[in-house]
Image: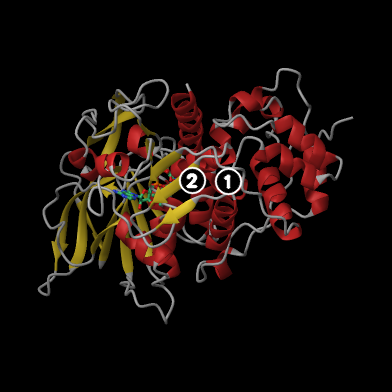
Amino acid sequence: MPNMDPKKTPMPVQDPNVRRSNFEEVAMGYSEEDAIYEAQRCLHCKHQPCVSGCPVNIHIPDFIEKVKDGDFEGAYQVISLTSSLPAVCGRVCPQENQCEKHCVRGIKHEAVGIGRLERFVADYHREHTQEKPVKPQSNGHKVAIVGAGPSGLTCAGDLAKKGYEVTIFEALHEAGGVLMYGIPEFRLPKDIVRKEIENLKALGVNIVTNFVVGRSDTIDALMEEDGFEAVFVGSGAGLPRFMNLEGENLKGVFSANEFLTRINLMKAYKEDSNTPIYHPKKCVVVGGGNVAMDAARCARRLGAEVHIVYRRSMEELPARKEEVEHAQEEGIIFDLLNNPVKVIGDDQGWVSHVECIKMELGEPDASGRRRPIPVEGSEFQIEADCMIMAIGTSPNPLIRSTTPGLEVNRRGCLVVDENEMTTKDGVYAGGDAVTGAATVISAMGAGKKAASSIDEYLTK
Ligand SMILES: Cc1cc2nc3c(=O)[nH]c(=O)nc-3n(C[C@H](O)[C@H](O)[C@H](O)COP(=O)(O)OP(=O)(O)OC[C@H]3O[C@@H](n4cnc5c(N)ncnc54)[C@H](O)[C@@H]3O)c2cc1C
């Protein structure tokens, strides 16, 4: 008989009053007993709707069955058939919109905690296994990957398992992409990402850091001079957008990307870091996605009073529900249905106030969400010495501008066919570089698909 508890087994978390001044992980994970109890909630439906909700099609009921039996290592083996970053996905995937959205238990009550179980299994494996993956025999084919984010890492891992000689060229000094420079330590500890990358290296993947494709070398040179027979571009969407407001170039205005990179990659919050960070007293974060939540929660941990300014209501807020709840518990103030119109400076050139206008919601727009409309004459000011813009990013144009034959759409994203091949023969692409800012698991799904297409392309 399944466990008919209507609620997910709760995940222990750090006390909000403690965690808002440290960068340690907020959620603390299941115990073995919690995991078995939660696994018993799975009904093992015949048609497995949860699997179709997962972009990499993890065999979810099969791994949960193993957890139920206490065979945690067996559960890990099932997950690793299709996913190369389970400890990451178990922590940051928006499961509520993917696998868990399709869970039959979720129709009347709470879905099975698939993400929490995935995290438990990956952590159990990491803590109990010393075994390293074994490098397969080379098949003699060379493939280059641009960018070491989740799409590039997944593509590299799948190709390496098939015997390809894979080299990843990464612009930053450390691999991981957004997992390292964007998502904060308190949501995704960096040692976990590093460990997953170590496993890829053990499979034979070569990672060259501090190498900017388009500057250090071009894709054409990699293919024509260095013998790479195919290339996968997983260069993400790291170019921040601004609103072109009056005063946006005042001191104290940051893009979320810069603010988060200083904190997460460069550890600027630590006293011995070589990278400085501004410690705001009152900070306005503009935007309502995961990036805005992460920037707000980091600013809070630096000691600021933080206001999130978002132009729609809580219902349309795109960030993960869990992250919004965590932010609220940490004392972040949500100024919803407001939009900034001007940044006001003091006589030293620093931000002193952010002027906003109230908004109301009209009819749904092309995105299906109700269109925010400014309420005339409702302007007001929020006192702030820092403003962080988290309103979206686009792909950096460097790769496209240095690679003849690569086409992009009007949003600057690379155009690919159904096999992830770009408009240039032998060059594939996936992840945020193709879709614009999206999710870790969709980037991984694209990397996986591209690996299979590259394999077909090189062995046909
Ligand atoms: C702050 C933040 C929080 C997020 N939170 C979540 C979340 O909770 N859940 C979720 O699912 N998604 C989240 N996302 C989105 C998710 O992280 C991305 O969709 C995902 O990382 C995209 O993967 P990618 O491999 O396409 O690109 P990226 O992760 O961006 O990696 C691209 C890599 O390519 C490198 N690169 C770029 N140009 C070059 C070049 N010319 N030469 C060499 N290397 C290059 C970059 O340095 C980078 O390392 C978040 C994003 C951000 C910014």
- Residue 377 point in image, percent of width and height: 15, 43
Figure check: 405 above or below 304: above
The answer to whether 417 appears left or right of 125 in the picture is left
Is there CB contact under 8 Å for labels 1 and 2?
yes
Mark 2, secondary structure of its residue: helix
Disc 2 under 8 Å from ligand 1? The reply is yes
Reading the image, the residue beneath label 2 is 153
Q: Residues within 10 Å of mark 2 (few under 14, many from 20)?
A: many
Quadrant of the snapshot with the N terminus? top right
- Residue at 52 percent of width and 61 percent of height: 190
| Res 174 quadrant in image | bottom left
- Residue 193 point in image, percent of width and height: 54, 56
Front in this rendered view, residue 404 or 255: 404
| Res 418 quadrant in image | top left
- Residue at 48 percent of width and 55 percent of height: 327
Specify whether residue 319 is in view. Answer: no
Q: Which label sits on residue 85? A: 1
Front in this rendered view, residue 31 or 348: 31
Depth check, mark 1 against mark 2: the one in front is 2
- Residue 421 point in image, percent of width and height: 36, 26
Q: CA distance from mark 1 to mark 2?
A: 9 Å
Q: Amino acid at mark 2?
A: Leu
Q: Residues within 10 Å of mark 1 (few under 14, many from 20)?
A: many
The answer to whether 376 appears left or right of 339 in the picture is left
- Residue 394 point in image, percent of width and height: 27, 41
Residue situated furthest right in the rendering: 1
Looking at the picture, the colour scheme in use is secondary structure
Figure check: 293 above or below 159: below
